[in-house]
Every structure is written in structure tokens, then in C-alpha cells.
Image (cartoon, grey):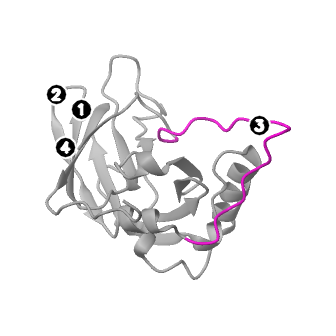
Amino acid sequence: MVLALGGITLAGPAGAAAPPAADNPRPKPPRAVSEVQRATIPALRRPAAKTIPPAVREFAHARTNGGDFAPNSSLAREVTIPSLPGSNAPTKWYVMPARGGVCIFGGRAGSCVPNALAQHGALYLQFITPVGADAIPPAGQPVPSTIVGASPEGASSVVAKQQDGQQVEGKIMKGVFVLVATDEVTELNFTNRVPMPRLPGR
């Protein structure tokens, strides 16, 4: 499957939360990981984290008050990834179910997307690697970055296509994928070597 990326973002594909309408009450966090989420997001089949950092709880609280997804930080799954050369991304990540979606959090940044997008690998965060003293490279210069996200069910590998035409292969571990790019990433290509499971109720 191929996922097209909409340019450089710091919070993945999820947009800013809109305030809930007066006649549209805030959604309540789910009490458990749904069957569909468990079947399609490998990270959510891991045991729940024993300790939830305050930053994760604050992120979930903010998204719930925003009225969009209402993640349950108490159901977060913790995944630790190795520090990769050239990467400035955090090594400890939390994937958690939300009302109608899935969220990921690492360091001080998080993102949420609907279940239908998370099932195809669209739940990710992108960290731009500073170049010298500049947080973002000058216009026209390569944009090195690290992308970390929740891998979809059956994905055995992930390859990113860069703006310069080069391809970079990432790693998938414990239900999370990570790759270090040397230029702007335009596509993520997940290779499935095992058939997708039959979704509950279908």
C-alpha cells in the first residue's frame, strides 16, 4: 500500500482540533481497545503500559477537550525503539485507542487519525532534523527528518520515497515503524507479506 504525504508536518496527518459545538457534546474515551483496532494495529495488541507519563495524560486530556478523538491514556501501549544515527526523534512511544480513532505520542508531540487511516499506516509523526543552527533548512535545501508511526497489520517492511527520487527503507519493530530520511518524504510504501486479517463483523 502507498501513503501519500501532504508535505512536511510536525504532527502527522491529523489537523487541529475544532471546539465542540454546543449541541455536540465531547466524546468520551473508549473503555477498551476495539476488536477492529486490535486486528489492524499490531501495537494495540501489546500489554498496556504499567506507567503512564504525565505528558501522555496531558495530551489525551487536551484532545478530549478539543472534542475530536478522546484518547484513553490508561490504555496506552508503550514501545521503545533504538536511537538511530541521524535521528532526533524520541525513543519511547505510546500508542493508544481513541473514540473512533487511534493516537500516537512521543516526546512532547502527538497525533490522532481515524481508524480507517490508521489501518493503512497514516498514523505518524515527522521530526525535522535541525541543520546547523537552523530548525528548518532554507528553501530549496534537502529536508532531513525522522518519521515514526504505528505500522498497519501485515506490514513486513516500509520504504519512503523522497523528493529527490531516492528511496529509504525503514524498520518495523513492536508495531511501530521508524525511518530516517535525507530529503522531504512524499510517499510511504508498506509491503504486506501476509494476508490482511478478516475484520470483525465483515
The residue located at (19%, 56%) in the rendering is 157
Find residue 176 and name its label.
Answer: none
Could you tell me if the residues under marks 4 and 2 are in contact, i.e. CB atoms within 8 Å? no
SS at badge 2: loop
Q: Which residue is labeled 2 in the image?
A: 165
Which span is picked out in magenta?
11-32
Q: Give the x, y percent position of residue 4.
A: 32, 33
Q: Which residue is labeled 1 in the image?
A: 162
The residue located at (64%, 65%) in the rendering is 30
Q: Which residue is labeled 3 in the image?
A: 19
Amino acid at pointer 2 = Gly
From mark 1 to mark 3, how far is it between C-alphas?
A: 35 Å
Q: Considering only vertical position in the picture, is 56 above or below 47? A: above
From mark 4 to mark 2, how far is it between C-alphas?
A: 10 Å
Q: Give the x, y percent position of residue 150.
A: 39, 57
Q: Main secondary structure of the magenta part?
A: loop
Q: Which residue is labeled 4 in the image?
A: 168
Could you tell me if the residues under marks 1 and 4 are in contact, i.e. CB atoms within 8 Å? yes
- Crowd rating for badge 3 (residues with CA inside 10 Å; few <14, some 14–19, many 20+): few
Instruction: Tell which of 120 and 172 is nearer to you.
Output: 120
Res. 123 in view:
no
From mark 4 to mark 3, how far is it between C-alphas?
A: 38 Å
**20 sits left or right of 197 in the view:** right
Q: Earlier in the sequence, mark 1 or mark 3?
A: 3
Res. 199 in view:
yes
